[in-house]
Image (cartoon, rainbow, N blue to C red):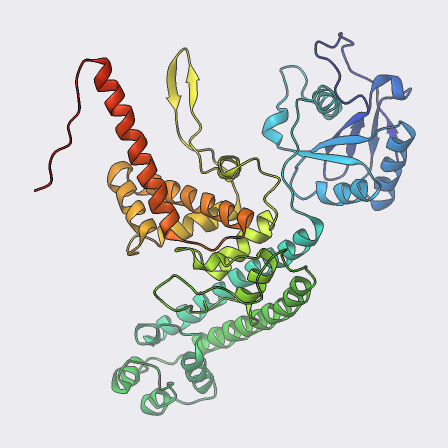
Amino acid sequence: MARKIKNKGKGSARMLPLLHADAAGIDIGAEEIFVAVPPERALEPVRSFGTFTRDLHELADWLKECAVRTVAMESTGVYWIPLYQILETRGFEVFLVNAQHVKNVPGRKSDVSDCQWIQYLHSVGLLKASFRPPDEICVIRSLWRHRESLIQMAAEHTMHIQKALSQMNLQLHHVLSEITGLSGLAILDAILAGERDPVKLATLCNGRVKSPRDKVAKSLEGDYRAEHLFALRQSLVGYRFYQRLIAEVDVELQLKMGGLPRAEGAPEQMPARTKTRFYQRAGNEPAFDLKSELFRIAGVDLTDVPGISAITAHTIIMEVGQDMSRFRNASAFASWLGLCPEKQVSGGKVLSTRSRKVKNRAAIALRLGAHCLYHAKNYLGEFYRKMKWRLGAPEAVTATAHKLARIVYHLLSTKQPYSESVLAKCDQQTNVRAEMRLRKQAANFGYTLTPIPEL
């Protein structure tokens, strides 16, 4: 139900020219939404609406009556999603803006003044829409984020299993790399079935387990108490429950990803990998062939880049999409990820050069990939170690993640396979430019640089 709001605008003349005359501003809350339109479009230019679906459609109808074409709103939690989808479906141009970009000036802090302030900033062109991938990518992104939550919940039950085993002094996690693997689950099922003979339990290990069987049997000698066995049973049931949910999500993911079109100009078969090690599936990868699906959608094999696994590549594509035309260049893409230094200068003095704090899942995935390159024997591994020696570990991770972001942008834009020779050529060109710069500086001071002859 709409509610009339008294206009609290100060009525001051606009100082900037109008760029969006048909603009509206929306302040979103959990139970109430405030909307402001240009004062000449309605008798009550500010109105309040509820958050039920019927109220949202009534809000869209009112904006149509006021001849509004573009709308700006803050990204407040998840409350903006239903209204954003309805307005986009109704044909409005929706600007989802960063809350830091619409900070209120003193004396304006209220829901009514907030929506008026957003409407004014949007009308004079001072707001920039946040990046949002296409709707079909957003569908898969929601499923993938839900899958990550399920994996975290399953991991909590894994820790509960290990806690119950430790309380009974069963040191199974010291002889098996994964207590929820094939061998670990077989041993846990036998324990809950009543088996207490450590030798018989050790024989349940798979042939690929490298630990000696006598050591495994020794680790299974413990104090089997009823309360800890009860906790172990419930934790194992919870773990398997979430594994079934993850399998259902994998089926839905495969269905949705199969509906995405093949990338234009993508070859039928993936090119040969440049990594020395063969590809290994991670333990939390989906059941289907994720690597092949990503190649079909993106048109390039991102997993061929050192530090990028199939899960990392999937996270990047689902957060950004396969179309990089929304970003002006690789520098703009790295800046959006928060992997560029943000220089703050005041009075001619540099206050800070730290990178922005951005909660971006793609940036987190790239940082994790960069952190794994410490021992890599390739160009990116050498780059990470050089940056760590010069700047320190945290800055080296950011610098290497920035390098990975530029590589990903280039691969997705050009659809060319990854090649380290391109990076080596760029470094060679950088060295040539540095030499020319030094020679010019020396010439300005009356000196001539002479290279040292090789011994």
Q: Quadrant of the C terminus?
A: top left
Give x and y (percent) for residue 179.
40, 74
> Looking at the rendering, which quadrant does residue 172 occupy?
bottom left
Farthest residue toward the left? 455
Residue at x-position 50% and y-position 77% = 233
> Looking at the rendering, which quadrant does residue 440 occupy?
top left
Residue at x-position 67% and y-position 44% = 78
Farthest residue toward the top? 13
> Looking at the rendering, which quadrant does residue 433 occupy?
top left
Give x and y (percent) for residue 164.
41, 71
Give x and y (percent) for residue 15.
70, 9
Q: Quadrant of the N terminus?
A: top right
Along the line of sight, the residue nearer the viewer: 390 or 41: 390
Along the line of sight, the residue nearer the viewer: 145 or 344: 344
Q: Where 341 falls versus 138 (above or below)?
A: above
Give x and y (percent) for residue 26.
75, 30
Residue at x-position 50% and y-position 53% = 416
| Total count of labels | 0
Along the line of sight, the residue nearer the viewer: 120 or 125: 125
Drawn side of residue 76 relative to residue 337, left or right:
right
